[in-house]
Amino acid sequence: MTPTTTVRSPLRLYGRSGELAILETLLTRLSGGRGSTLVLTAPPGLGRSALALHTADGHRGPVLRAAAAPAERLLPYSGLHALLCSAQVPLPVPPADVLRSGLAPTALLDLLTALGARRPLLVCVDDAHVWDPDSRAALAFAVRRLAPGSRVAVLLTAADRQDGAEAFTGLPALRLGPLDDAAAAELLDRVTEGRIDSAVREELRREGAGNPRLLTALAGHLGRDQVTGRHPLPRPLPGAEGVLAAYAAHLDALPDDTRTLLLFAAAAEEHEPEGAGADTILLLRAGQLAGIDAGRLAPAELAGAVHSGGGRVRFTHPLLRRAVLRRAPLARRRAVHHLLATALDGPHRTLPRLVQRACAAGGYDPALADALARAAVPPRPHADRAAALARAAALSTDEALRGARFAAAAEHAWLAGEPGRARILLARVRAVPAPGRAHYVRGLLALRDGPAADAREALLTAAALLAPRDAGRTVSALLGAAEAAWAMGDAAAYLDAMSRLPVRGSDPSLERYRAGMCAVFGGRTAEGHALLRGCLDAVAQARPGSTGGSDDPARGLRAGVAALVLGEVDDACRAGARALAAVRAHGPDPLLPQALEHLAYGELRAGRYALARAHAREGLCAAGRLGQRNVAAHLHAVLALAASVEGDARTCGEHADAAMAGAGPHGLAQAATLARWAVARAALADGRSAEAAARLSPLVQPGPRRGHFAARMPAVPCFVEAAVLAGRGTEAYALVEEFAGWTAQTADPQAPAQLARCRALLAPPAEAAARYEEALAHHDRADGDFERARTQLLYGHWLRRRRRTREARGPLRDALVAFERCGARLWSGRVRGELRAAGEAVAGESGAAPPGPLVLLTPQQQRIARCVAEGATNREVAVRLSVSTRTVDHHLRNVFATLGVRSRTELARLLDRDEERGVRRDVGRDEKNVADL
């Protein structure tokens, strides 16, 4: 790098784990006696020098290391001389002999080979592209001819598309990209010692474009109050001069007309979406007005500064465009913007023309600000309206009007799917008091990516401020506050927000929804259910485009919630599908993750686990793209529940942990409850009923630690099963009676069968069989393989425990088929164990017999041995496997005799060693597969 672009290495290299792994491999190969070559290339400021320094410091052997000097000072072979003089060991050949004219390339090759023969040698040259031509040629010659066994590794760094870099063309290269958002945020937190405000961080991240040096410089030029958000940021942000000058230097050799056209292209992007490029036709017209032939842009394309295609001209790097604008004098920039405004004629170009005029403005211009605000209307996209309103705010003189326009711009940025930009715009609202719309947007942002309690308070404040003059946003704010309360699990707060909605409105479906939810949460369940059914009917029957129509995604989402409250899971899936289709067709983009979440949860309740998983995964991708961590937490919980059905305990745990990581800091009780339920159900599938009961008890029992109100009753059947199998059945009686009351009110098709199953689990032996038959009869009237298979599994287990093994095999076989049909692998394994215990050989079991000593044991002995090795007592093993303690004693004695062990400790050590061998076997197989690939 040139002296103007030297990067000061941070305390750690952020976001470079992949690059560091590659460089570590280079050093590992070198220590093993295998040389290799790598060229690190990158635009200015991305940290190639820091990576080279890190690699050189990590090598324990000799290093030849040289940094570059300004090219105009370099004499022939001066770069190579500096490299040789950096040797830490005596050279077998004097540098002067190596550098003799005509012999340097071969002499350098011989020298490096000789040094590598002594000890593994690392050659590290930073900014090799600015070496003198003779040194570059000699180095490239030697590097290309180093034998693989020479024990010499060469690491070079070179700038992208710079003179001199072509000498190393064809060598293995690694091009550095910009830091991702997370790494950039980490770097800014470190540079500011964690004091940076979230909105300031977002603005610096966007301005820094993932460039570590630029990010560090931008943060370093701000005062403490500016970093913490107490004072507004300066415009433009200082600190970018050095990096942008290095980018602009790439264009110095271009003709003047070419640089002028590049300035036109950079200025024309001011009214375009980020990354869209400049309109080629507009550049042609601007060039004609300036007397420049558009063909003069060709040298810039050849130099790699821009590329054309699809009617657009785009810069190859966003910082290059910014460098072109910053380097031009202010008067010239204004002239270019004026010329572009002239070229943008016609009514369909009103907003772009006004934006160019705003860029040319020398200060406040209330008339131009008003014109921009008037032009920021449909059908312009939300992103364009956000940009126009932001410029209108900057041109306004009245502070209250400025604040209102920045708040409006923030709302449109949020609707465009740019929450970071929305936060930046909100930070520019300095009016006191802040307008209601600012509180509204702040609440919407927190609802998707912040503490739910903060979102609720911000939205209630917004509703109070907006009520006199903005009925639409008032209703939206109150519904958002209710949604936040629901996510928190605060039923009283939910009822409070819903009660504040206007009693009479223009939307009949919303009126029925409000009244119905208030009635349900007020204890008038029958009345509330009737009103919610009316809401469903009103949405379904409305014509598309009409008030309350099904093509409105927000109304479709409310219809889905109403259907779930009623227990109409099929209607919930249909409403979710309609809402998703409406979002895809009409937007807004920020509703996409929520629509996918609602649909996935409805499909989960309906027993369509594969569909739920597919929609939840898509929702996770959308939530990540839009920065909606709260929705991501709920989607992780849905995926955890799906994994608990499919029997993948590891995947279930990973998604549950991810859900809890987001739910805890933001107070998302619903996501936390669903995640805990999922982990408990996976434990139940694995036969760990005591653990499952312990996890589920706080979620379903009354008290301060209870779970979310909407998930409490659906989780009761799981708890009853776990509690009975764990010997805690007495705790379930009161819950079953409460569940019976809920079943009488809900339309959930699985509830009657689940109630009969719970009563069968708690019934005396004389009544249990009839209860199980009643549950199976209810299952016959509803879909859902999984719930039916669970009932059949428990029925077969009960029959086997009563020594009615022949009768037990029928329901157990049916359960196995049903579990396999819905992909519940772990549950299938539990059924197979029951069938073997009932004396039936199970055909078609997947997987090979367990390797090592366990192959000598029967399946029942294997299960008991594993439980004992985990530390369980005989009584705990009996509860987990639903056998008597005498059966465990008998099998355990046979296990000890077969395996030749004398204690539980010896058994645990034996199984641990066997597991380690299995892990090594798996790792070896994986490494072989990777090598084959």
Image: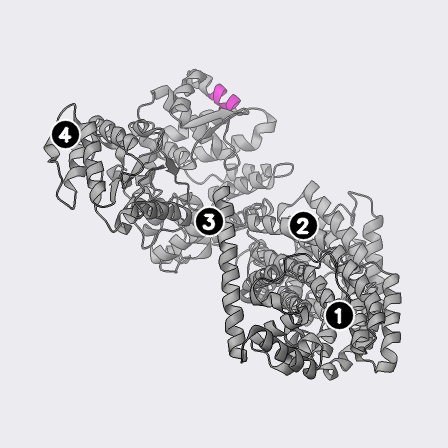
Does residue 283 show up magenta in the picture?
yes
Q: In the image, which disc is placed on residue 99? A: 4
Q: Residue at x 50, y 42 (%)?
A: 932
Query: Decide: marks 1, 3 in contact (CB < 8 A)?
Result: no
Q: Nearer the viewer, mark 4 or mark 1?
A: 4
Disc 3 is placed on an element classified as helix
Look at mark 1 in the image and give the residue it sits on.
Answer: 521
Circle 2: residue type: Ala
Task: Please indicate, yes or no, whether residue 341 appears anywhere in the rendered image.
Answer: yes
- First in sequence, mark 2 or 1: give its number: 1
Look at mark 2 in the image and give the residue it sits on.
Answer: 614
Q: Nearer the viewer, mark 4 or mark 3?
A: 4
Task: Please indicate, yes or no, whether residue 506 appears anywhere in the rendered image.
Answer: no
- First in sequence, mark 3 or 2: give its number: 3
Circle 4: residue type: Leu
Q: In the image, which disc is placed on residue 402? A: none
Q: Residue at x 40, y 37 (%)?
A: 319
Category of crowding for the residue at label 1, using alpha-carbon neighbours closer than 10 angstroms: few (below 14), some (14–19), many (at least 20): some
Q: Magenta segment, which residues?
A: 279-286
Quadrant in the rendering for residue 77: top left
Where's residue 151, x and y in %?
Answer: 27, 41
Circle 3: residue type: Asp
Q: Nearer the viewer, mark 3 or mark 2?
A: 2
Does residue 74 show up magenta in the picture?
no
